[in-house]
Every structure is written in C-alpha cells, then in structure tokens.
Amino acid sequence: MPEPKDTLHDLFQAAGHATPDTDLTDRIMARVAVTPLLRPTPVKPILGRGAWIGIILLTAAVLLWGLLGSANTETASGPVSDAWRTVSSALPSSGNWALWLAGLSASLLVLAAVDRVLAGRHRSI
Amino acid sequence: MHPVDHSTIIQRILGGDSRAYAELVRHYQRMVYTVCFRVLRNAQDAEEATQDSFVKAYQHLAGFGGNAKFSTWLYSIAYRTAISHGRKRRDGEGSVDELPHHPAADPDTSGQRSEVRQLLDHALAQLDPEDASILSFFHLEELSVEEIVTITGLGASNVKVRLHRARKKLLDVVQATYGTEAQRLILDHA
C-alpha cells in the first residue's frame, strides 16, 4: 500500500476515475442480452474406476504369471504350462515378453493417473 | 460507492436473471474504463475495450470460482482485453503516439478534478501504458503488489521494479512540466 504522505498517491486520488459516456451501461447490457453464459462442461476421466481396477489387476496378473510361468515352464506339465510354452515359443526369443507386458500395464497405469489429474485440474479452474 | 453483494448477484445471474448484471456493470464500469483508458489512451477504444471486458466477464461468470476477489478477476479481464486491443490497434494502424483524448461531453470533467485529471493523463502519457496501468492499480485502486501480479500476470519482482521506475519517471514528468501547479491542484482538491 502507498504511504499516506505520498504526492503521487494524492494526485491519483484527486484525479479519480476516468468517466465513460453515460449510456455505456445500456450498451453493455444490450450486448449481454444476446450473449450466452458459458457453462464449464464437466470433464469425466477417460478411464473410470472400473478401468483403474482392471489395469491394476492386469498388472498384478501379468507380473504373477510371468514369475510363476517362468518358474514352472521347465518342470511342470498340463494345459496352463502347455499354453505358456506355445505363447512363449511364438514370441521373439530376444525379448522378455513378461517384462514388456508389465511395462505396458505400468504405462497404462501412468496414463490413467495423468488422465485423472488433468480432469481434476480442469474441475478446479 | 455502495457495497455490492457479489455472490448474491452472481447467483441471480447464473440462475437466469441476466439483468442483475447491470448492478455489477454500474458498480465497476468506471474502474474498468479507467484500466482500459490507461492502456489505450483513447476514449473510444477504451469504451470498446470496456464493453468487451464486461461481455467476456459475463460469458465466463460461471467459471469465476470465488478464490480471488471479483474486482481482481474483472480487472484481470479488463487489463488483458485492453492490452489485446492495443496490440490489434498497433498492428492495424502502425505506431500511435497520441495524447489522451476524453469525450467532450464528459459530465465529470468540470472544475478542479478535471484539471487534476488532465494533468495526470498528460503525465501518464509519457509512460509505457502497462506501467501507467500498474501505477493506477497501486495508487488509485489501492491494490497490493500481489493483486497486481494476479491481474497482470507479471512476476512480483517485475511489478515492484516497474512500480519504482514508473513512480520516479512520473514524478519527474509532473515536476518538470507542472512544477508547483500540481501540488497546488492536489492541495486545492483535498
């Protein structure tokens, strides 16, 4: 705040506000009458609560399947192990598919988190 | 100026009573016009910018969260609208170094206040329009540096530096051009 004994402050206060034409209010209100109010549209996150839970379950399942599957392929037999061997034989040998899937799931998780943060930020504007 | 219950008026407007907006317009139009005039230095341009500012504020009223004061929010719209008008005018017409021009039929430009206002208008015309606005926010509206930061979007240190330089320059201009006359006018008006 300006100091009380301030020449410039006194000058501004003495001059006061500039004065527009007397019909300015009418002109503004005439424009307002034909102007729609813009209502902020609520933005829902692309991924809802269900998708969140699905991604978490998928991530956990992929990690578990990868860990258990790699431990069981060498010894176990049965429909699950056979399916595991079929899938893993179809994948390129240079890649660790479980790691890739875990990375994909984690990426989805991050994207979902970003989505919710952005939606929350839009609401707070 | 009588106090205005902003939240009640805003609720009425959002409820569909657009005529309630006239109360806000009447209360703030001189302040908004002054902000626009300080930036644009021309009555016609300032009135256009004032109209645009109020229409924009009306359109986005639902987005006014109430986190800041309504006046600060409105000043912010007015300041940015005026700056935008100034840029468009410069782009369209080249450099404009004109003296401030008020309408001839200004009902409040008679007597002592009118003399002081003309003196101030001419002195402020020597300053950068943004600096003139910052001075006006600080000395006329008595806003804090924090509020000026919110309105202008400038950093706090930038506002303080501009304020310091602009004050010094304005004092120099007033003293060099008007000398003791300025002091006499202020004292006479007080």
Image (tube, grey):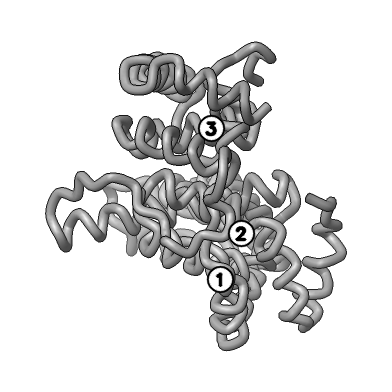
- Count the labels in the image: 3
Is A50 left, or right, of B85 in this rendering? right
The amino acid type, in three-letter code, at marker 2 is Gln
Q: State which tag comes first along the sequence, 2 or 3.
A: 2
Instruction: Give SS at disc 2.
Output: helix
Residue A98: % across, % down: 46, 49
Q: Residue at x 60, y 40 (%)?
A: A16
The residue lying toward the viewer, choosing from B137 and A39, is B137
The quadrant where residue B138 appears: top right
The quadrant where residue B89 appears: bottom left
Residue A84: % across, % down: 49, 60
Q: CA distance from mark 3 to mark 1?
A: 28 Å
What crowding class fits label 3: few (fewer than 14 Cα within 10 Å), some (14-19), or many (20 or more)? some
The amino acid type, in three-letter code, at marker 3 is Val
The residue lying toward the viewer, choosing from B52 and B178, is B178
Residue at label 1?
A24
The amino acid type, in three-letter code, at marker 1 is Leu
Q: Nearer the viewer, mark 3 or mark 1?
A: 1
Specify the subunit that label 2 lies on.
B
Residue at label 3?
B149
Badges 2 and 1, same chain: no
Is B58 left, or right, of B122 in this rendering? right
Q: CA distance from mark 2 to mark 1?
A: 8 Å
Q: Residue furthest left?
A: B94
What crowding class fits label 1: few (fewer than 14 Cα within 10 Å), some (14-19), or many (20 or more)? some
Residue A72 in sight here: no
The residue lying toward the viewer, choosing from A17 and B91, is A17
Instruction: Give SS at disc 1.
Output: helix
Badge 3 vs badge 1, beta-carbon distance below 8 Å: no
Residue at label 2?
B29
Badge 2 vs badge 1, beta-carbon distance below 8 Å: yes
